[in-house]
Amino acid sequence: MIFRQLFERETSTYTYLLAARPGGKAVLIDPVHGFEDMYVQLLGQLGVAPGWAIDTHTHADHITALGELRDRTGCQTVMGETSQASCVDRHVRDGEVLDCDGLSLTAWFTPGHTDESFTFLLPDRVFTGDLLLYRGTGRTDFQSGDARKSWRSIQRLFALPDATLVYAGHDYKGWTVSTIGEEKRFNPRLAGRTEDEYVAIMAALNLPRPAQMDVAVPANLACGQVRSP
Ligand SMILES: [Fe+2]
């Protein structure tokens, strides 16, 4: 399998590139607007074609590259069925398997960070978006986020084998990968906690609003097409 993890420094966002084989079609998960040239160049260098561009959820902190990638490459854009982004080509349901040219990506509806967040799974790894982060979890204080739903969605992930690799949508401290077993044992918001304790922790975070939120959310509902006022 071809696998790349790309990092966008402004908003500490990870984008993932996956393909079953050279010569096949690739999947990009959570691509960032402004990096389309780099993605297209890298796909060419790796000898894979653009197949699918997936957003795990409607991002509040950066603008998605879904629309521009679709317009430039003809790839198919994908989000979960609860997304309000009507520009997306395909909305996947909970449990649906996306057949991506030899890669079978299973979609799970995992609300909590937002009410429309999805997680995408391969047999050995899981792309958690902003639900489960490395030793942390995605905030639940806007976009209809809900700490109880976040807890329950994370418990669903925690039923996966401990060795399952975790690839998150962001990291702010330098982490690049984890496992389900590690996060069960060492995530300070989750390990040894009850659901009520987790809800209290999330309620006390008092995080600032993302700087780009008022621009990013409406743009992302249009697959990243930024409209001038
Ligand atoms: Fe997010």
Image (cartoon, rainbow, N blue to C red):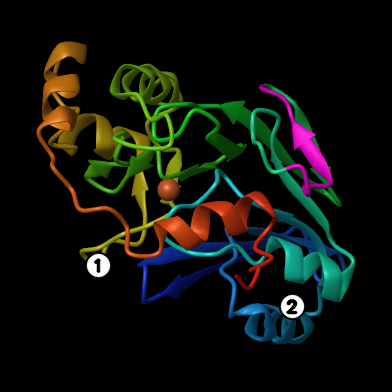
Q: From the top left corner, tell me how far across and down residue 45 is, in percent.
A: 73, 87
User: Callout 2, which amino acid?
Assistant: Leu
Q: Bin the neighbour count of mark 1 within 10 Å (Cα to Cα): few under 14, some 14-19, many 20 and up.
A: few
Up-down: is 34 above or below 172? below
Give me the residue at 21% from left, 13% from top: 195
Question: Compared to 139, does 191 lie above or below?
Answer: above
* SS label for mark 2: helix
Residue 187 vertical placement versus 38 (above, below): above
Nearer to me, 115 or 227: 227
Residue 73 figure quarter = bottom right
Decide: marks 2, 1 in contact (CB < 8 A)? no
209 or 194, nearer to the observer:
209
Foreground residue among 48 and 63:
63
Q: Which residues are magenta?
A: 86-94
Checking the image for residue 43, the label placed there is 2
Left or right: residue 220 versus residue 172 is right
Q: Say whether residue 96 is left or right of residue 207.
A: right
Horizontally, is 21 left or right of 14 in the view? Answer: right
